[in-house]
Every structure is written in C-alpha cells, then in structure tokens.
Image (spheres, rainbow, N blue to C red):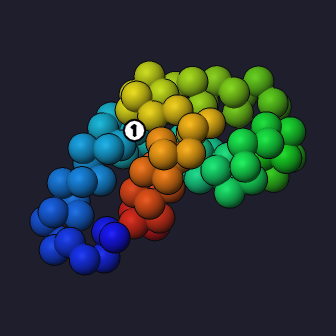
Amino acid sequence: MIESLNEDDRDFFVKAVLNDAINDFELLKTIQTTIEHQVNISVVAKQLYMHRNTVQKRIEKFYELTGLDVRQFEDALKAYVCIKYLT
C-alpha cells in the first residue's frame, strides 16, 4: 500500500500518522516490538529488557502522541506500516 505512493506522499502519510512520536526512536522500537508480539506485554518486556510497567507506559505515551491504540488491529496496522517505513 505505502509502496504505491511517491516519496513525498509517503513522508506526509508517516508524519500524519505518527505525529510527535516520529522522532522518539525508543518509543517506536517499543511499539514495533509490541505489535510483533501481539501486544503480549510480558514477552515484549523480556525482549527489550525492561519492566512490564515501562512497556505499558510507552504504549500509553504512544496513544497520547498519536491517538493510535496498538491493541486495536486497524491502529496497530497503521502504526506498524509507518514504523517499518522509517526503518
């Protein structure tokens, strides 16, 4: 889907979806890992060597910055596509 857009449109789409979270690479890594592990907080915490509460706080912070709830499929899909485009 995102591959069919030209570079300017892709950048606009990614910036529009990720908003203020676009420059917080630690947060984006946490969200990417969370989505890849089907929002299993315990597994994500072990994978990233952090406490479960830290993962939960980062998910909440991402929601505050973007309005995307990664526990919902459509929001997780939007976030994941944009994060993968950045990496």
Task: Give whichever of 43, 78 is nearer the camera.
Answer: 78
Q: Amino acid at mark 1?
A: Ala
52 relative to 73, above or below: above
Tell me: 64 left or right of 44. left
Q: Name which residue lies at 75% across and 53% down.
A: 37
- Residue topped by disc 1: 21
Q: Quadrant of the N terminus?
A: bottom left
Task: Give whichever of 55, 73 is nearer the camera.
Answer: 73
Q: Name which residue lies at 18% across and 54% down.
A: 12
Q: Report whether residue 48 is seen.
A: no
Identify the image quadrant of residue 86.
bottom left
Image spot of residue 38 (x, y percent): 72, 49
Q: Name which residue lies at 20% across and 72% down.
A: 5
Image spot of residue 52 (x, y percent): 81, 30
Tag 1 secondary structure: helix
How many marks do you count on the picture?
A: 1
Tell me: 65 left or right of 7. right
Q: Report whether residue 9 is seen.
A: yes
Q: Name which residue lies at 60% across and 31% down.
A: 59
Image spot of residue 48 (x, y percent): 76, 49
Image spot of residue 64 (x, y percent): 44, 22
Tell me: 58 left or right of 42. left
Badge 1: residue crowd in 10 Å (few <14, some 14–19, many ≥20): some
